[in-house]
Amino acid sequence: MADSLQAAKRLVIDHYRAVDAAGPDGAAAAFARHTAQDILWRGIHPFNERTGADAVAATFLAPLKRAMGPLQRRPDIFFAGENRTEASGLWVVQMGHLMGLWDGDFLGLPPSRRIAFLRYVDFHRIEGGRIAETACFTDLVSLMHQTGLRPFPPQTGAPVLTPGPRTHDGLLHDPQDPAEGRKTMELIAGMIDELVALGARSPIDHLERWWVPDMCWFGPGGIGASAFFKGYHRGHTEPFESGLEFIRHNGHVTRLAEGCFGGFFGWPSMTMRATGGFMGMPASDRPGDMRIVDLYRRDGDRLAENWIFIDLLHFFAMQGLDVLGRLREVSRT
């Protein structure tokens, strides 16, 4: 297994080198070099699901490179592992920022003409020596903030450039002790199972069971970052729990861990209803799906840090709110 994980990591690194070196017109060929011909690529709204390198390049890579390229990849977390859900498969995860100069329009939004950081996390499923499936979550709301646009009212957490692990050891290029990865996965699974049983609520006794007291929670743009139990309740869980009605947990496409790092993504993870209004947006009785990524760092027998991506634009689109379209109109005035 260790050899398979290391080979998968090398494949993904080679993939990034090819894609990052390509210009807009060469993005499709570079993306195709290490991927399956019929690769399923999942991107957040408005990219959504695409099949094949040409579609991924036309929808996401080429427009991004034209607006901000050449891009510098700055990863903070990198690990691999076997899928721990009922589905099998070997996956590789990387999280960090893509940095460039935002000099051209992107998604109809005006450029900042300054340095820009696009926060991202990728999950790659490896099969037959190729990348067969990818989930690419990017934080477009945070990017909007960098050009002065405010898609939502002031967020409850801090709008910061999301840091990597406090321990600066998140890039797991070398083999790890499998026992440590199992310990991480068991802790994450236990915490999530209890959280779902609580209806996506985080009372203090739940936090004390699973988290270190100085835990850090790095949420998506529009919600922001929070720290410690008090700040986490104030900055995330209280607005989340008061504004949203939990309908169901839909499970995860993959759960994996290596060493002290692990996580999952769901497509979608949860279905919620914004009965109390959420993030300053109006209340709605329509169910909405939340596509979510959670990455974690374990410290001993507790979780210490959590990085979150939520496809908020998709969730609000299901409420009938076109956040991106509204921002395009604002930017034209």
Image: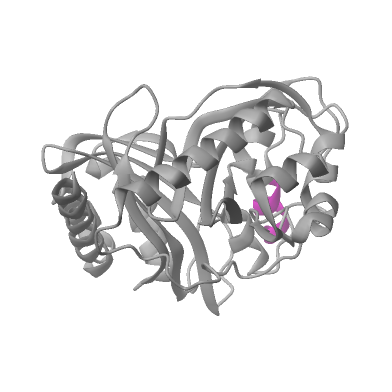
**Observer-nearest of 149 and 302:** 302
Q: Is residue 107 left or right of residue 176?
A: right
List x then y, in percent, for residue 63: 39, 57
Name the image quarter holding residue 150.
Answer: bottom right
Specify the principal SS of the magenta part. helix
Point out the image quarter for the N terminus: top left
Q: Which residues are magenta?
A: 326-332
Point out the image quarter for the C terminus: bottom right
Q: Is residue 45 visible?
A: no
**Observer-nearest of 79 and 283:** 79
Q: Is residue 269 visible?
A: yes
Q: How is the image coloured?
A: one colour
Q: Is residue 120 left or right of residue 212?
A: left
| Residue visible at 63% across and 47% down in the picture | 324
Q: Any magenta on residue 319?
A: no
List x then y, in percent, for residue 316: 69, 35
Name the image quarter holding residue 268.
Answer: top right
Residue 290 lies, with reference to residue 98, above or below; the image says above
List x then y, in percent, for residue 185: 45, 41
| Residue visible at 58% across and 42% down in the picture | 311
